[in-house]
Each structure stands twice: as C-alpha cells, then as structure tokens.
Amino acid sequence: MAFVTASWNPLGDAFYRKSELYEMSWSLKDGLRDSLVAAAPYGGPIAVLKEPQRRSPSSRPHLDIYSASGQTLASFTWKSGVVLQLGWSVSDELLCVQEDGTVLIYDLFGSFKRHFSMGQEITHDQVVQARVFHSPFGTGVAVVTASARFTLATNIDDLKLRRLPEVPGLQGAPSSWAILTQERQTKVLLSIGPELYVLDHTSCTAVYPPGLSPDSGSILQMCVSFSYKYLALFTESGLVWTGTSSLQEKFSEVDTKMRSAPKQMVWCRRPRAQQPSVVLMWERLLLVAGQCGDTIQFPLDQVSVLVPELDGIRVLGGFHQELLQEVPLVSQEIFKIASMSPGALLLEAHREYEKQSQRADEYLREIKEQSVLSEAVAQCVEAAAHEWDCTTQKALLRAASFGKCFLSDFSPESFVSICRELRVLNAVRESTVGIPLTHTQFKQMTVQVLIDRLVHRRLYPLAMEICRYLKIPEFQGVSRVLRHWASCKVQQTDLSDEAVARVVCAKVGDTPGVSYSHIAAKAYESGRPELAIKLLEFEARSGEQVPLLLKMKRSHLALSKAVESGDTDLVFTVVTFLKNEMNRGDFFMTLRNQPLALSLYRQFCRVQESQTLKDLLNQDDDHEGLGNFYVASAFKEQRLEGRVAALQNAVDEFNKAKNDFNAKATEEEMKLLRFQKKLDEEKGAGLQGMSLQDTMETLLNLGLHKQAEQLYRDFRVPDKRFWWLKLRALAEKQDWDELDKFSRSKKSPIGYLPFVDVCVKNHNQHEAKKYLLRVSPEQRVQACLLLGDLEGAADAAIERRNEGELGAVLNRCPASNRQLMERLQRATAKK
C-alpha cells in the first residue's frame, strides 16, 4: 500500500503503470524467439508454434497451447503445412492459417475440429500474409497472396469468401495493412510507400490522413484500436500519427526518434481514457507515445509479444507477463501524492483508526464538513475494483466499510456487488486457472461468458462454486456446468461404461435442466452406444429417450420405451419409423410383441392402408378381425355384386372364427340386400343400403304392406316392433280403415292405448273413441285423459280406486266442475 504509486509513470495529465500478472509457468528454452505466438484477449489462452517455417519431415514444428499463466493445456507436433498466422476465435478456438490458404481449427485442448479453404485461387497463388480479426459478424480471416490480391471471410461459422479488388501498383504484400470495421462493413487499410488505400468489396480508394507531415516518408506500420475507432501510423521518419479510423480527425503526431519499423504497434486505451496512447515495441525497447506528445520508455530484457486488451496491453515474455494500462482516474485521485480527494481522506482516516489514533476523527470531520462522505465511500469501492493487488483491494474496501458506518442512507448494493465480483476475479486470476481479467473486462464479458470459459477449460468445480456464490439461477448456472461436465465425462475412455454411468448418475442426480438424453447423445457420438443406453435408463421422459434409440438403430427398445410411456403419439411415431426402416415381415413380427403398438397401427391402416391391414390380419390368422374387415369393405363398395361378395367373405371368416352370431347377421344382411334390389327393380322404391327397420318403414309408407309383412316374417322381427312401425305409418297416412283392419287382425301385442294416442295426435277424436272400449282397465284412465273425457276418466279411476290415477284426474279437473271434484275427493278419502 505504501508504494502503490512507485510503478506509475506520468504521460501528460495521466499516469501509466505496469503490473506483473504472472511468472510464467512454462519452460521455454529460448523464450518466444523464433516462434509464432497468438494470445486471445480477455485473459485468454496462448498458442506458441516453435520455428513455424521449418519444413523438414524429420524435424517438425511443435504447437503448444497454454493458459495465460503458462499452464500447459495441449501440446502436439505440427504435421500439416507451413503456418503463417495463428489467431483465436471469439469462442476460444485456435485458427491456424497455412500458406496454401487452408485454415485449420482446434479447440483449447488441441483436438482438431474442422477446416476450410480460402479458395482454390489462393491455393495456387500461396498466402504471404494473413490476419485473424473480430468483427460484429464474428471471427474473420483476411489473407493477401503473392499476386497482391486480398480475400476476406468475415465469419468463419458462416463462411462467405469475398475477393477484394486489385490495388493499383501493388506488387506482392503491402508494407503494412490492417482490418477496419466501419458501419458493419469490413475493409482493408493498406499502405504502399507513403500512400494509403482503403479497400472494400467494390473499390480501392486512396485516402489521406489529415495533418500527416509531407516529409514523413513511407508508412511502415499501422494499427487500429480494440474498438476499431482509432488508427495509428508509424512512418520511416520515426513519426507516430494518431487519429480516427475514418481519417476525419487527427489526434497527435509524436516523434519517437526511431527510424526502424517496430516489431509491434498497438493501441493502449481504456474506456474514458484521459491520455490514450500507442505502444510500440522494438527488440529491446517498449515505448508509449501519448497524444500529449510525451513518451514513456521501458527497457525489455526478453523477446516479448503485445496483446491488446479492452483497457490496456498485456506484455507477454518468456519468463513473466505484465499488464500495461493507464491508471484509472479514481485511483489517481486516491493514491497520488498530497491528494485531498474524499476517497484519499477516507483511506487515511481508516489507516489512523487502525492505529487507534484520534486523527481518524479529524479526517472524518473534514470529510463530513464538505458533505462528501458518500462520494468518498463510492471512490474507495470503485478504486478497489481496478486494483490487482489483494492487499490494496482489502484496504480500500475496509475504508469504504468504515465510511459507510457513518451514513444512514447509504445503499450497500454497489459495495456488496464489488466485493463479490472481486472475489470471483481473484479466484480466476490464480495461476492455476490463468484468466487475468480486469474488472472492466469482466463487466464487458459478463458472468455467463466467464462461466462458459471455465467450462470450456474443464474447470467445473470452480465454475459451479462461482455459480452458487453469485446465486445464478440453477438452470443457467450449475445445471449448465453439470451438463457440460457429463458430456465431457462420457468421452473419457479410461473408465468402463458401467463406471461412467454410475459416476454421472451420482453427480447429476435429478438436477433440473440436465437431460440424460443429451448426455447419452454425446456418448453415442463418441462411439459408446452401450453407455448411451445405460444413461438413457436414467432419463425420466420417454419422449427424450425414443429419438436417440431410433438414431442408434435400437428399434425394439425404442418401441418398448414408447409403449411404457403410454403416449400414443410417441408410439405411433416409432411405428411409422419402423415401417420405413424394416422389411414388411420383420415389421409385422415386431408389432406382434407389442399389442398397443399393433392396435395403433391397425387403426392407422383401417383409415389409410386397408390392404396392409388385411395382410396383417392374415398373418395373425385373425379370422374375427378379417370378418370385420370384409364387412367394413363391403359398405365402401358402390356395386351390389361387390358388396355381396365382400359380405360372403366375411361370413366365411366368421364361420372360421366360430362366431355364429356375426355369421348369421352377415347372411341376413346379404338377404336384405337382395330383397332390396328386387323391390328396387320392381317398384323403384330406392331401398338400397337401408337398414331393416328403415326398409319396413319405407314399404309401409309406400303402402306395400305385403312386402313389409314378408320382411317381418322372414327376418323374425319382434311383434311389438312391427306393430309400432305399422301403427305409426298408417296413422301418418291417415288410412283409418286399414288401421281398423290392422287392429282387428289379431290381438294387439302393444295394447290399444297407442291406437288412441296416434289418433289423437293426428286430430281424429272420433277414430280414437273406437279403440277406447278395447283399452285395458289399467290404461283406460290414461286413454280417457288423452281424449279429454274427464267424466270417463273419473269413473275408471273410481272403479279402480287407484290413488295415483285419482290424483291425476283431480289435477286435470277444472274448478268450475265442483260436482266432479267432490266425487273424486270422496273417492280419494275412502281410499
């Protein structure tokens, strides 16, 4: 704490500091000399390819992948072509651009994922320089060939190659070039001697940096900022020009006194920077050139690589790694010498308080008199977030905690949030993890992306602890980590299928958001189908099990699982799949072992594939089903001959099934069809296809009583049914003579009350009275009531002394007929 400002270097109104991040864990014999190096931003991994130009088959280059702290993640011998450029994608995939235009992509652990080519023409011309860049579209690759043609791919995940126009006068690679992203367009900025050109998809345009000295000479080096908003140019006269990348505004022009081109030139600019700068690196010198015209020089004792970040630069060497950045304004206000800012006073007050000195009260009084205690607490909290040293972080946070004790309305949310975030940052900054994130980078990256990076590095315990500590919802946090862990676990070959399944089940359990079917799919993709089946046993949702089982060609098991689920839609899905995959015989045999599946398929065939249903029933010797099939087929036939033939087949099948009732009913249907045809031909009655009852009703309505009676006798129609049919038919026709004859033909099986009823309904009271005397005594009261004969109804009810009938008549009796009401009341009283 006492020497916080010891490493600060002034540049204009600001200060720059260089903090050591790590002593590198790797053991590189010659450091980074003769190596192709690529380090991902946001504290990402580092790729080192030793002696990339080596072409001897007996002595190939070696590619190593490390964490930012130098921990080895992967190491393998490079067996492909000559690599010109390494780069990292936004998802931490390593891109290796070869001179033949092929781009090979590896994951963090050196496993090959895929490759693509930048085009056949590039393969012929050969690549001389390449760049891997990031844009709003994703990760892109740009190459320039020996024939001086540029080709771009702005998104490697959605590959669309764009060949840019030729540049006039360019022979081979330009002296320097960079990628610009402006207004969602990717362009190339290149220099030919002192001239600058912007190359887009359609044209090559000469541009002129405003204010660049005419005698500056050729442009030897250029770079754009992390955000692509700013541009820096280095000329052979040693000048560094800075301005906007649109070349509309100039910031500064600094003389570095160096004539040779730097090995690297990058922007060092943090958000809300006071003094943005450009950092240039030569073999033994690191120079920071600010817009104020001043410079800072740092000697280099090792071969180094500059890694641009959102808020600074990582200086990567063979033995250690440092972070160069502008000191945040809040840190300057607190720590600079003789500072009287509220945060500085509060920090000093807390120091005195820890010494048990009364001067602490004096500092606090001074802060309170200025009414800046809230500001002091906020400054200490914000400054703690930007510090790398844990001791400094604690001192600032304790000072903030001390200050907020004297505030009654201070919201603790920011304090608690910074404490949590710093604890996470300190955990991932550990050399064993090797992700040196600043707080600014962390806020830009978001917690979810950090969790993803830890997961991709297989640091599962740390990822889950961070999820729990930050109280991330389980589905987005722990469940996602466990899902990735399990997917990785099933790809390990050092354990048996049984052991892996047991470990995964014990770890995952019933964690919500983790699908065993997803894990099983990963196992199957890794060539472990038996493990996939074991994992599927833990999947509670059959709908998730079945698709993978079908993909694995485990059709019988898929069908069993679908049937067990009770989901008919799922069963039908499997049956449809089996039907398309199996031959007919095997398919039918498979269904025979699953009655539910067989039933569903029969229902489908009944509607869609009747011939298949017939074959299925034949194979099962299901004569009952075949009989029903022929009956259903018969009624789809339009011609009588076809219908009768189908019904005859049904009779034969019912006889084989020993179903006498169905056989007899089918024979009677055939008999009825023939009878209907005969009458249609003779009388034109239009009876074809009617039921027996409808046929008799139609005949009676047509006056064909003999034919109706013939059906009544031939088909043994019950007497009551036939009498009811004929009674209604004659009454509707008002054929009262025929009705009278019919009533006298024999004793009515339905009684004579219906005769009274139909006559009354058809408004013939006179005819109804003919049948009143023939109505049984039990029904006479009801018959008299139908005719409206209350006197007769009363006489019949009194004679029968039936309390219910007496009450019914009494209810119908009008109040004006007092004599009748008294008779009924006396009869009721006697009862």
Image (cartoon, rainbow, N blue to C red):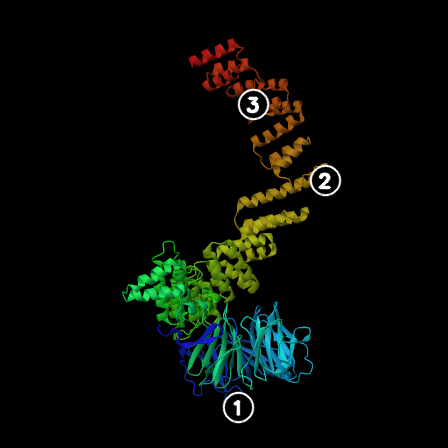
Residue placed at 43% from the left, 13% from the top?
829
Q: What is the x, y in percent for residue 762?
A: 64, 23
Q: Secondary structure at mark 3?
A: helix
Tell me the amino acid under the disc marked 2: Glu
- Residue to which mark 3 is pinned: 753
> Relative to 180, is 561 on the left or the right?
left
| Distance of label 1 from label 2 (alpha carbons) | 102 Å
- The quadrant holding residue 117 is bottom right
Q: Secondary structure at mark 2?
A: helix
Tell me the amino acid under the disc marked 1: Ser
Tell me the amino acid under the disc marked 3: Leu
Residue placed at 48% from the left, 14% from the top?
798
- Residue to which mark 1 is pinned: 56
Task: Please report whichever mark, 3 or 2, sits nearer to the chain's N-terminal start.
Answer: 2
Res. 681 mark: 2
Between residues 429 and 272, which one lies in front from this camera angle?
A: 272
